[in-house]
Amino acid sequence: MNIRFIELSLKIFILLLFIFKIKEGLTNTMDTTTKFSGRFEVNIDKNFVHKKTKNNKWGNKLKEQIKNQGFYKYKDIIENSYKIKHNHTIKGFNIKNDGSYSSLYIDGYRLDKIDYDIEHDILLKIKKQVIILKKSLNKNKDKVSGDWGLHNLIYSVRDDKIYNIDQEGFFSYQKLPKWGNLKKINSWLDKILKYK
């Protein structure tokens, strides 16, 4: 009887492991495409995201801003913006003079790719974190900087938290831009809250 119990337990464990792996593969952060041309070519390996500055209008604008404001200011923001709680971001590292950098890969769901096909339990967790994020940003409205477009926001399954993965945005937009002010950020996040 003990052998049958062990065999059954092993089969259940393998089945649960298989289900977890399938569910993990359903996240949408491996797709880095957006409707925006962006400043970076993005490459993802298992645990890291590598952002290489493009030679386009936006990449060249970043390089010029780094030249004008100083590389060490840029480096400090990329490496340390995660320490400011309301930034909801991760640490960047391996920062290059041209603006290229790396960061941890966050497996989860990009908020701009949320749709009605998402699992209901995941959607509820995302909505809960959207409410927490909105409260944090609104509470710190005079300090908020960066690019909070939904394509930069990822819900981490592991951490049960939304991250702004655009560390460079905290340098490029040290004050919120008009096109991405707090009122617009709230309206973008409100769209996520409307999903049922």
Image (spheres, rainbow, N blue to C red):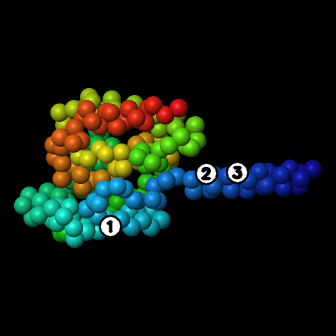
- Does the rendering let one see residue 91? no
Nearest the eye: 161 or 119:
119
Residue 137, disc: none
**Pointer 1 residue:** 41
Q: Quadrant of residue 65?
A: bottom left
Report x, y in % for residue 120.
58, 37
Relative to residue 144, is residue 151 drawn left or right? right
Q: Residue at image x 34%, y 50%? A: 152
Proximity of marks 1 and 2: CB atoms separated by less than 8 Å: no
Q: Residue at image x 40%, y 59%? A: 32
Relative to residue 88, is residue 114 drawn left or right? right
**Pointer 3 residue:** 16
Q: Alpha-carbon neighbours of circle 2 within 10 Å: few (<14), some, or many (≥20)?
A: few
Cα separation between marks 1 and 3: 36 Å
Instruction: State which tag comes first along the sequence, 1 or 2.
Output: 2
Q: Amino acid at mark 2?
A: Lys
Secondary structure of residue under mark 2: helix
Report x, y in % for residue 160.
47, 41
**Pointer 2 residue:** 23
Q: Quadrant of residue 104?
A: bottom left
Instruction: State which tag comes first along the sequence, 3 or 2.
Output: 3
Secondary structure of residue under mark 1: strand
- Does the rendering let one see residue 138? yes
Which-is-in-front pick, marks 1 and 2?
1
Q: Amino acid at mark 3?
A: Leu
Cα separation between marks 1 and 2: 28 Å
Nearest the eye: 18 or 33:
33
Badge count:
3
Q: Reply above or below: 110 against 134.
A: below
Cα separation between marks 3 and 2: 10 Å
Q: Alpha-carbon neighbours of circle 1 within 10 Å: few (<14), some, or many (≥20)?
A: some
